């Protein structure tokens, strides 16, 4: 995990990057009431207040504790309250019970953020060149970590607001965008030995799980030129997709029966046709937009129904490297879905849009839905976690989860890249995940 050319980075540049990311988090929270920010609607989600505190704890713990002269904690209890899963750092409050923490309140968290921001800025501005090189690595990790939590803030509050019987909204809907996705097309990809993963000398930030770079043998395959639409998912449902056991992996079938799945998460049918809850409220399903909030099990069942499969993460990365421009590979919410001005002032969407007319090339690789792959989340050959507590960031989760690629409409601009490996358990649905198909040639 590194920020390139740290010897040439100024403290001003690091402070600007830090402040920009921290302000975006606050902007995302601004439309929410204190009550909104305290709710935890299921064990997988966390209150907005907790995300704001935890990302602050991260800088507090990994920068200030080690590098601030005469360090004193803002509050002695905060290490226990806001630690997420770092065993090396100490005990923590149980994750499923975070919604029970009515105190500290939202204003207390705001004060914690202000205090930490003041101290981080002073630390960076007073650092020597050698100290700045070390701090730059930690700022790079911390700001990218906070951007991950910005996406989680939106994911989690969407689940919270969906529980409101009167259709609570977070922000206005988009006023314009593509209206069609066109017919599903296929792109032929030749067999090759593909080089996968982040080069050691690459510029820009990368997480440790994106390397080491290595070669993978790919057989000839085809990949769909866009994501599966909600209209195509309705066809799957109409053909008994949720009732046909032969389409499903055993674990997914038994889970879907136990939990009563009959549609993607946030789809509702009140007798007047299917509707979907988004951060813009409850509204009709756009059959041309990508289906989203489906689990790996559902995505795999759909692929089986179509007689094909999901792509591997290596196929996806190989195609992305060949189909995206240098500026796109540098990252970003490429379709501009993430709100430029988060909150009620925003005018762009927080929901995937139709792909637009076919182009003959791959579409929707970034910025609409995280795309399930059929690859298990495992270490690349030669991977070793970084030493210390930071090593717990990715490595210890490399089991019982599946890889997703591409970024979604909640992903902050500049945060995605072709080598980015997201991962979730196969049964989860609250993240903004969609489906791209692949097929053996």
Image: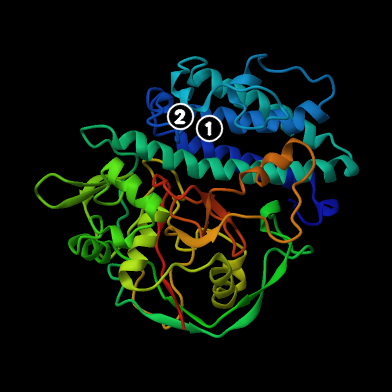
Q: Residue furthest left?
A: 271
Q: Mark 1 points at which residue?
A: 51
In the displayed structure, 357 sits above or below 20; it is below
Camera-side residue: 290 or 91?
91
Please report the residue visible at 81 percent of the width from the left and 29 percent of the height from the top: 66
In the displayed structure, 279 sits above or below 202; it is above
Q: Quadrant location of residue 165?
A: top left
Q: Position of residue 357 (x, y in %)?
A: 34, 77
Q: Name the residue under label 2.
A: 47
Q: Locate residue 358 relative to residue 317 in the image: left or right.
A: left
Q: Position of residue 50 (x, y in %)?
A: 52, 28
In the displayed structure, 6 sits above or below 310; it is above
**What SS does tag 1 mark?**
helix
**Is there CB contact under 8 Å for labels 1 and 2?**
yes
Please report the residue visible at 53 percent of the width from the left and 38 percent of the height from the top: 25
In whole angstroms, how far apart are the C-alphas of marks 1 and 2?
7 Å
Please report the residue visible at 51 percent of the width from the left and 27 percent of the height from the top: 95
The label shown at residue 26 is none
Q: Locate residue 389 relative to residue 416 in the image: left or right.
A: right
Q: Locate residue 92 relative to residue 10 in the image: left or right.
A: left
| Residue 39 visible in image | yes
| Residue 16 visible in image | no
**What SS does tag 2 mark?**
loop
- Crowd tier of the residue under label 2, counting other residues whose Cα lies within 10 Å: few below 14, some 14–19, many 20 or above: many
């Amino acid at each position: 995990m590194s920020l390139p050319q740290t010897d040439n980075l100024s403290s001003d540049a690091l402070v600007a990057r830090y402040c920009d990311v921290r302000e975006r988090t606050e902007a995302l929270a601004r439309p929410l009431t204190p009550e909104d920010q305290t709710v935890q609607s299921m064990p997988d989600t966390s209150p907005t207040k907790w995300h704001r505190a935890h990302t602050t704890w991260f800088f507090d713990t990994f920068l200030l504790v080690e590098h601030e002269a005469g360090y004193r904690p803002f509050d002695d209890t905060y290490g226990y309250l806001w630690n997420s899963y770092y065993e090396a750092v100490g005990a923590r409050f149980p994750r499923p019970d975070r919604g029970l923490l009515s105190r500290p309140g939202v204003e207390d968290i705001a004060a914690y953020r202000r205090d930490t921001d003041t101290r981080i800025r002073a630390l960076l501005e007073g650092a020597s060149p050698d100290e700045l090189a070390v701090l730059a690595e930690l700022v790079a990790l911390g700001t990218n970590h906070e951007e991950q939590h910005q996406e989680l803030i939106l994911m989690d509050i969407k689940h919270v607001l969906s529980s409101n019987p009167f259709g609570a909204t977070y922000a206005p809907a988009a006023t314009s965008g593509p209206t069609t996705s066109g017919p599903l097309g296929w792109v032929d990809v030749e067999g090759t030995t593909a080089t996968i993963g982040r080069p050691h000398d690459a510029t820009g930030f990368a997480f440790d799980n994106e390397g080491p770079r290595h070669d993978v043998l790919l057989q000839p395959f085809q990949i769909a030129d866009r994501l599966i639409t909600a209209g195509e998912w309705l066809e799957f449902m109409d053909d008994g997709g949720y009732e046909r056991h032969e389409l499903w992996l055993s674990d997914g079938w038994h889970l879907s029966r136990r939990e009563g799945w009959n549609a993607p998460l946030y789809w509702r049918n009140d007798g007047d046709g299917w509707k979907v809850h988004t951060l813009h409220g409850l509204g009709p399903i756009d059959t041309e937009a990508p289906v989203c909030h489906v689990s790996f099990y559902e995505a795999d069942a759909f692929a089986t129904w179509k007689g094909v499969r999901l792509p591997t993460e290596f196929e996806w990365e190989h195609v992305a490297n060949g189909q995206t421009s240098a500026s796109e590979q540098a990252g970003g919410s490429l379709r501009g879905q993430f709100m430029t001005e988060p909150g009620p002032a925003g005018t762009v969407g927080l929901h995937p849009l139709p792909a637009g007319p076919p182009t003959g090339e791959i579409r929707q690789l970034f910025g609409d839905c995280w795309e399930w792959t059929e690859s298990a989340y495992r270490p690349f050959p030669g991977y070793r976690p970084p030493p210390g507590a930071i090593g717990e960031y990715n490595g210890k989760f490399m089991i019982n989860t599946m890889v997703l690629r591409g970024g979604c409409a909640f992903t902050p601009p500049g945060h995605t890249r072709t080598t980015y490996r997201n991962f979730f358990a196969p049964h989860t649905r609250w993240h903004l995940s969609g489906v791209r198909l692949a097929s053996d040639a």
